[in-house]
Amino acid sequence: MYSIKLLSLFFFSIIFTVLVQAADQPNIIILMADDLGYGELGCQGNPQIPTPHIDSIANAGIRFTQAYVTAPNCSPSRAGLLTGKIPTRFGYEFNPIGARNEDLGTGLPPKEQTIAELLHDQGYTTGLIGKWHLGGAADYHPFRHGFDEFFGFVHEGHYFVPPPYQGVTTMLRRKTIPGGGKGRWISNHLIYSTHMGHNEPDYDANNPIIRGGQPVVETEYLTDAFTREAVSFIDRHSDKPFFLYLAYNAVHSPLQGKLKDMQRFKHIEDIHRRIFAAMLVSLDESVGTILKQVKDAQLDKKTLVIFLSDNGGPTRELTSSNLPLRGGKGTMYEGGLRIPFMMRWTGTLKPNQTFHRSVSSMDLFSTSAVLAGAALPENIDGRNLMPYLLNEKTGSPHEELFWRQGNKAALRSGDWKIVNMHRNHKSSTWELFNIANDLVEERNLATQEKEKLNELQARWNELNSQMKPSLF
C-alpha cells in the first residue's frame, strides 16, 4: 500500500510539473500582412484609411520603428522569419512565382528547423492559416515543417473571390484594354488597367485552397475565410499552448474589395486607391475579430500577439505607401526592407511603448523559442527580444543586418547603410547613407565618406562569404 501511495505521488508530481510548465508557455500568434506599406497604418501616420484594430496592438504594447525583414519580397522574407536565419545562409535567395512554386527543389529545405517545428517539440499545437509560399511540391508541405493544421494556399497569391467575382470590385492588370488601347476600362464592378504593362498573374492555376492536404471549395471572401479558420483554431486549442501563424494574402494583388467596404470609401476618387482601402479595412476588421476571440477566451494575459508585414509595399501596383521611406517591394532601400511591426502581451509588456532600435523578423524565432522553454540553436541569426523589451538589457538587438538577392545587396551597420541595386553590372556602384540623419536615403555619401564605404563593403564581402549560392 505504501509503495502504491508513493507511486501515485510520483505520477501526480509529474502531471503537476507538466501542467505548471504548460501554464508558463504563452500562446504565440503571428499576424502577417502581405505587401503592406510602411506608411499605411494609422499608428504609422496614415489618416486616410482607419486601422483601429491593428493600431490597438501598438497601443496596448510596443511599436517598432526600425523593424526589418530578411528580403524585399515574399518567399525569402518568410523563410527568414520562420527559421530565424538570414535566408541566403542556406541558399534561399529568390522569390518563386507561378509554376515555379511546383518545381522539385524549390522550397524551404526540410533540414531547416522552423518556429513551428521547435514549438511543436515543446508541446505546442501549431497552425498555419493563409499563404505558405515556401514550396508547392510534396516535400515542402506545411505538415512537413511542423504545422499540425493548415488551411490556405501554397503559391504567392490567390484570388479573394474567383470568377465571376461576385460581391467585390475587381481590378485586373492587362497589356491591352478592350478596343486595343491603354489606360482603364470599367464595366460595373470589373476594371482592366494597363498601368503595369502586363497581365494579372495566373494566381489560381494549380493553386487550390487546401485544408490539411486536400483541396476544398471556398466561397467566402478569402480574408474572411482565414479569419473564420483562425477563430476556430483559437477556440479549439484555448486549453493548451498554441502557435498560430496567420499569413494573410491581403493586401497583395489581385485587387478585390468587398462592395460594402468600397461604399465606405466612396469619397476616395481614384478607384485603384479605393479598392486598396477596402482590402486594408477588411484586413483590419479581421485582426479585430482575432483579438476579440483571444479576449473572449480569456487568453489576453497568456498570449503574445505580433503584427508585421512581409516586405515593403509595391506602390505602383497597389498604391501602398512606404512614406517617408525611399523605394518599395523588390528594392534594398528602406521602403523595401523596413516594415510596420508591433506586439502586445497584456500584463507582461507595458502599453504605448515605442522601440527605436533595430530589430528583425528573424527575432521572432529566438523570442518564441525562449518563451516556450526551448534551448536556442547556435546557428541562428535572430535575437531574443524579451530582455530588451522588459528593460533587462540595453543597446540594439542588431548592430548589423545583411541582405543579398541576385544583383541587389545591402548592409546596415549602426546608423550606416550601403546599398547596391546592380552589384554585378559593369557600372555597379555602392551607395552609402547615414540612416539616422537621412531616413529617406537621399544623400549618397559614398564620395565624402570613402573610408566608411570601404569598411562596410569589406564587411558585406566577409558576411557574403558565409552565405550559400541560391538553391533555385
Image (tube, rainbow, N blue to C red):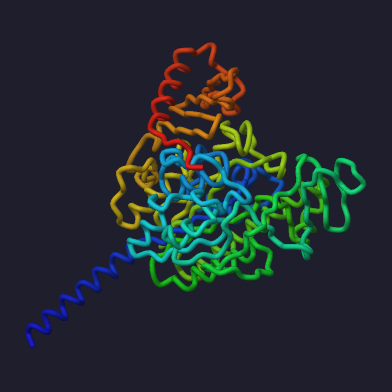
Q: Report whether residue 55 is seen.
A: no
Is 380 on the left-hand or right-hand side of 108?
left
Foreground: 53 or 77?
77
- Residue 372: where, in percent of width, then height? 34, 57
Name the image quarter holding residue 422.
top right
Q: Report whether residue 434 is seen.
A: yes
Foreground: 59 or 380?
380
What is the quadrant of the N terminus in the image? bottom left
- Residue 56: where, in percent of width, then height? 56, 54
Name the image quarter holding residue 242.
bottom left
Foreground: 469 or 17?
469
Find the residue positioned furthest to the right: 179
Is 294 on the left-hand or right-hand side of 124?
right
Foreground: 269 or 390?
269
* Residue at position x 64%, y 65% in the image: 224
* Residue at position x 86%, y 42% in the image: 183
* Residue at position x 52%, y 26% in the image: 435
Name the image quarter holding residue 299.
bottom left
Find the residue positioned furthest to the left: 2
With respect to residue 466, does 364 lie above or below? below
Find the residue positioned furthest to the bottom: 1
- Residue 72: where, in percent of width, then height? 56, 39
* Residue at position x 86%, y 40% in the image: 182
Q: How many marks?
A: 0
- Residue 135: where, in percent of width, then height? 52, 53
With respect to residue 84, does 240 lie above or below? below
